[in-house]
Image (tube, helix red, strand yellow):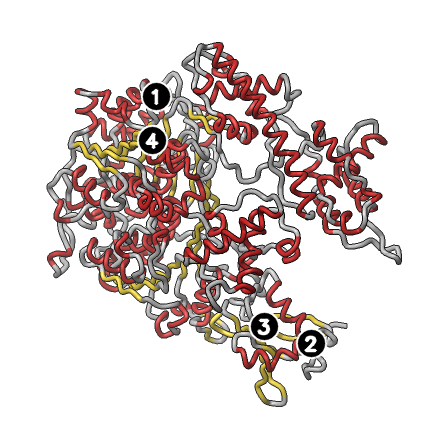
Amino acid sequence: MAATQASKEQKYDRQLRLWGDHGQESLENAHVCLINATATGTEILKNLVLPGIGAFTIVDGHTVSGEDVGNNFFLSNNSIGKNRAQAATELLQELNSDVSGNFVEESPDKLLDNDPEFFHRFTIVIGVHLPESTCLRLGSVLWSASVPFLVCRTYGLIGYMRLAVQEHTVIESHPDNALEDLRLDQPFSELKKHIQSYDLDKMDKKDHSHTPWVIIVAKYLEKWLSEHNCQPPKNYKEKEAFRQIIREGLLKNENGFPEDEENFEEAIKNVNTALNPTKIHSALEDLFNSEQCNNITSQTPTFWVMLRAVKEFVHSEGNGSLPVRGTIPDMIADSQKFINLQNVYREKALQDAAAVSKHVERLLQSVAKPPESICEKDIKLLCKNASFLRVVRCRSLAEEYSVESVNKDEITSSMDSPDSEMVFYLMLRAVDRFYQQHSRYPGVYNYQVEDDISKLKLCVNSLLQEYSLNVNIKDDYIHEFCRYGAAEPHTVAAFLGGCAAQEAIKIVSHQFVPFSNTFIYNAMSQTSATLNL
Amino acid sequence: MAVDGGHRDSGCNWEGRWNHVKKFLERPGPFTHPDFEPSTESLQFLLETCKILVIGAGGLGCELLKNLALSGFRLIHVVDMDIIDVSNLNRQFLFRPKDVGRPKAEVAADFINSRIPGCKVVPHFKKIQDFDDSFYREFHIIVCGLDSIIARRWMNGMLISLLSYDDGVLDPSSIIPLIDGGTEGFKGNARVILPGMTACIDCTLELYPPQINFPMCTIASMPRLPEHCIEYARILQWPKENPFGEISLDGDNPEHIQWVFERAQERSAEFSITGVTYRLTQGVVKRIIPAVASTNAVIAASCATEVFKIATSAYIPLNNYMVFNDVDGLYTYTFEAERKENCSACSQVPQDLQFPPSAKLQEVLEYLTENASLQMKSPAITTTLEGKNKTLYLQSVKSIEERTRPNLCKTLKELGLSDGQELAVADVTTPQTVLFKLNFTN
């Protein structure tokens, strides 16, 4: 047991550094359903099996064709004629013995007819190359069951993904450029006290040059505030003046020239950061004001109970601010000064998290749930990430496809730009229409290409008409989509495979932020776009 | 049902095998490259003639081999100097636990050749520097999945050295396109380089900022972060204590890492620093870059798409740089990186070195290593004095380093160098020497 754990730590080392042991655990507890083991489907699964997804089930009623084997790494020519779900499962399973692979030799339509609840057991369902009717049927079942649904397809040189999830909360969004939480504009009492323990004028050179820039800025800010009617430096001119004052604080050598004090240079460089007002940004305010946050019941998910607790903290102990994050960036200082400063923030963060915990307890009590239902660790994690919480909500497929609720604005405004990827979305909708009418996709065989152009154009026009979309689609796109002949070139399938797998991992792990709600990739120009439909 | 053109080897063909590919080779279309002509011969070109070189058989390399093989390419060579490690298995899908310790290039080639009938991947368990121009010249397109900027620059320099000019005009048949992919965590990029025509690796060196190391005084006397404690053990304690004898620290040896970890823990306890873990220790010592299957899949796919486009003229290739990031949603940004007029690799213009005659050679050396556009690693400087070749400074051979070290403290004037003097500089970042022209300032 220990040996397997150690070897898993080694095997997964490079990804554990991205999503941690807890992220890995959520992956290993997940069961993914893939519908249709086309090249796109198997590429997606490959990128989930390799990192150790707990289990996968392939649902596919098709038999393997020669064409299938030609573009699919997980089908071999001796599986031609066999069921595609089974054939692909074998070769995918072989990638990682930690993963449990299953298959169902059935079309999704049959399953929806006979056993729609079959899909309720999955952490996420990934539907690849589904005809429109199947897609919408399945979408509706999964939406009601709150099972996230990721729709993917590769059509010629175009990749398409659609995420349909009602509400997806993210505590650990891992933002790339997070602003520090230093509270210099409103230092809490322990920080104030700590700043006061320094007297820059009485320090020897060694201490002076190794005082953290946060202290330096805080000291000079105190002075500035007392001289400027409690108004911090606001515009460029004032900030420059403030920087200059700090510069004058540099020790002078015996010739009267300023010494080389890197910590002071850091202070000057970080004035903008330091003067960032501590505030709750509007996205978080929106979350605080949302229904789920304000209406706590015994059914309320953990995320919202904790968020409500944070809101209550903000309105009481927090005095309008979030719990202190507790981390500070590295800065030039001697070890002791840095650690002491770091501890001031850390202890405050612990204190604030404890206060939030009390609110959580009260809220749980109020809905007759035991206080242990939400653990300390999760509360601390949420507090630390309070500024970065995200909630993703997608419109349902039904809403996207309904004439009443189609997102006309998004479509028409995108189509105003000549290079917009929106045209490919409309073309995919048009080929689906073609499929509905003709039970095949346009231009699959060489002799069909020419004739199908006019047939596809009719589908395009009927689509635009039905949704009252006053946009123009150039004939070139219609020609190109007939030319594609519903081909699934491997490199485009592989690109989408990487994208979709990572989005699935985000959904399963609740780390990093998933896209919402439509992604289009254009391999001709190597460009992409995210649309909200 | 359209039938494939005949290929003699029966196990290598079956009906419909290349259907997905053929639609892009045999049908005209409104967005194809102006040079594109639909033909049944293009597929034969891919299957029988087009030679592709894949550099690297790791995260990107495995994906590239699969992508190329399933796009119709069969004559593929792959170069990789590494052996398989267990930490590769989360994404380098051509390898299994039983393959640990074997050369990546060989295992990858075996797997592809057995999974994709007819594909003939030839492995080379070698460094790229083990080959000369006669090897590289043979390929139609070269695609890199490297994890080292030095190696990229070397490859870049090699392809530039293959260019031939007639009366100052570039001969297009001497151009070998270079497709380069790189990934780091959830970020990646793919670029198309036409040596001599479009921006090369060195033209955009500023896109790869130099790695920042912690200042020595912080490590030695003022640690604040767990990383500082780890570097203390690695840089200062190891050479002093030589816990396993007079051998250098091997990041792949768990015993070595364990030793560094324990020393780092002691140091962090001394300074009340928290956060030293085995995982962090390993990460710092080996400069580990996190990696997942998905990002490598995306970038290798973009690269392979470009190889296909260039080999078949199916579409206009990427012009010329795509950036990808899927931390928050999915983001791509495509732009045209510009050539640098005085690029040290591809501009053919001797590089300018501006120094006063009183400057010491040491200053020139520092400039060569620290300048953002040059970023040389250990430049060797030679020149011609009184008709004879003279090495001014060379680091990589101990005896020569010792002999030429005093030159570093001499001024350029003292060394006998004059205004306009040409200096030839060799470095690991390029297969050819770079010519510099000394410009004396006041």
Task: Locate residue A441: give its quadrant.
Answer: top left
User: Could you say whether the residue bearing mark 3 is in a helix, strand or loop?
Assistant: loop
Q: Residues within 10 Å of mark 3 (few under 14, many from 20)?
A: some
* Mark 2 in CB contact with mark 4 (< 8 angstroms): no
User: Closer to the observer: label 1 or label 3?
Assistant: 1
C-alpha distance separating marks 3 and 2 = 25 Å
- Closer to the camera, A463 or B207? B207
Q: Which mark is residue A146?
A: 1
In the displayed structure image, the side of residue B19 where residue A475 appears, left or right: right
Residue with the mark numbered 4: A150
Q: Chain of mark 2?
A: B
- Closer to the camera, B300 or B390? B390
Q: Which mark is residue A384?
A: none
User: Closer to the observer: label 3 or label 2?
Assistant: 2
Q: As shown in the figure, which amino acid type bears the numbered disc 2? A: Cys
Q: Residues within 10 Å of mark 2 (few under 14, many from 20)?
A: some
Q: Residues within 10 Å of mark 1 (few under 14, many from 20)?
A: some
- Closer to the camera, B321 or B261? B261
Residue with the mark numbered 3: B350
In the displayed structure image, the side of residue B289 where residue B422 appears, left or right: right
Q: As shown in the figure, which amino acid type bears the numbered disc 4? A: Leu
User: Closer to the observer: label 2 or label 4?
Assistant: 2
Residue A524 visible somewhere in the drawing: no
Residue with the mark numbered 2: B409
Is A477 above or below relative to A205? Answer: above
